[in-house]
Image (spheres, helix red, strand yellow):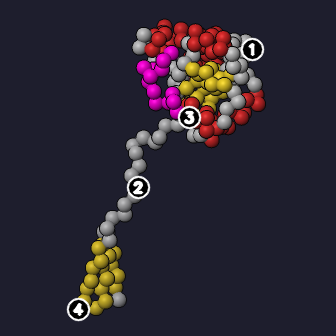
């Protein structure tokens, strides 16, 4: 008994008088895209260590990359040196530089360097209308109030992810888009 193997068929010979061939189709592998799916990057500017930990874990569990800055100045530095970010979650009250000033400086940097306007969302426990008005004036697109559940955070982020700046009311009004 003789077994010969050639690709893509296998030939088996049992005797000189009989020969059979079995055609085996090539192995089909799942198609893989040329580019792996990019994880979306979120910059969280938050001074409270507990909030950093909880929210960063939540963001990672939702499939995002989370970059943390502990105050507005550090957030501004990361924004300038590590961009692009798909979304920025900005606390309002922080040491060194608050979220309003950091947002104003980020918008100025974008304008001076002719950069695409980022989605900057205020992320605060203060729920006063005055605070929301101040966030809009500083250049934030929206405000998300803490505490927030995981599914609410996911829905909120999905509202901005994939939008270009023309979909952002803040950017439309402030920057004439």
Q: Is residue 166 left or right of residue 159?
A: left
**Which residue, given by chain and number where applicable, does mark 1 sit on?**
95
Q: Secondary structure at mark 2?
A: loop
Say which residue appears at 57% left-offset and 13% top-offset: 136
Q: In the image, is residue 38 above or below residue 169?
A: below
* Lower sequence index among marks 4 and 3: 4
Q: Quadrant of the N terminus?
A: bottom left
Which residue position is annotated with label 3?
Answer: 155
Image quarter of residue 103:
top right
Taking 43 as reference, is 20 above or below it?
below
The residues bearing labels 2 and 4 have C-alpha atoms spaced at a distance of 41 Å
For numbered disc 1, what is the local secondary structure?
loop
Task: Measure the C-alpha gap from mark 4 to mark 1.
Answer: 90 Å
Residue 101 horizontal/vertical position (percent)? 64, 10
Neighbor class of circle 3 (other Cα within 10 Å; few <14, some 14-19, many 20+) is: few
Point out the stretch of residues depicted in magenta: 158-170
As drawn, the label of residue 30 is 2
Q: Is residue 59 visible?
A: yes
Residue 54, how many percent across, how many down?
A: 71, 35
Residue at image x 37%, y 63%? 27
Q: Which residue is mark 4?
A: 17
């Amino acid at each position: 008994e003789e077994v010969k193997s050639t690709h893509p068929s296998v030939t088996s010979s049992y005797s000189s008088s009989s020969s059979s061939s079995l055609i085996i189709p090539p192995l089909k592998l799942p198609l893989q895209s040329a580019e792996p799916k990019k994880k979306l990057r979120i910059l969280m500017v938050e001074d409270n260590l507990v909030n950093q930990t909880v929210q960063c874990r939540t963001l990672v569990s939702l499939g995002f990359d989370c970059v943390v800055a502990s105050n507005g100045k550090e957030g501004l530095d990361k924004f300038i040196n590590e961009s692009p970010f798909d979304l920025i979650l900005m606390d309002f009250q922080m040491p060194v530089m608050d979220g309003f000033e950091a947002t104003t400086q980020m918008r100025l940097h974008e304008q001076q360097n002719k950069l695409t306007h980022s989605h900057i969302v205020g992320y605060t426990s203060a729920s006063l209308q005055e605070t929301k008005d101040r966030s809009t004036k500083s250049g934030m697109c929206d405000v998300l109030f803490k505490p927030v559940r995981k599914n609410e955070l996911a829905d909120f982020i999905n509202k901005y992810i994939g939008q270009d700046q023309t979909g952002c009311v803040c950017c439309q009004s402030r920057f004439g888009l």
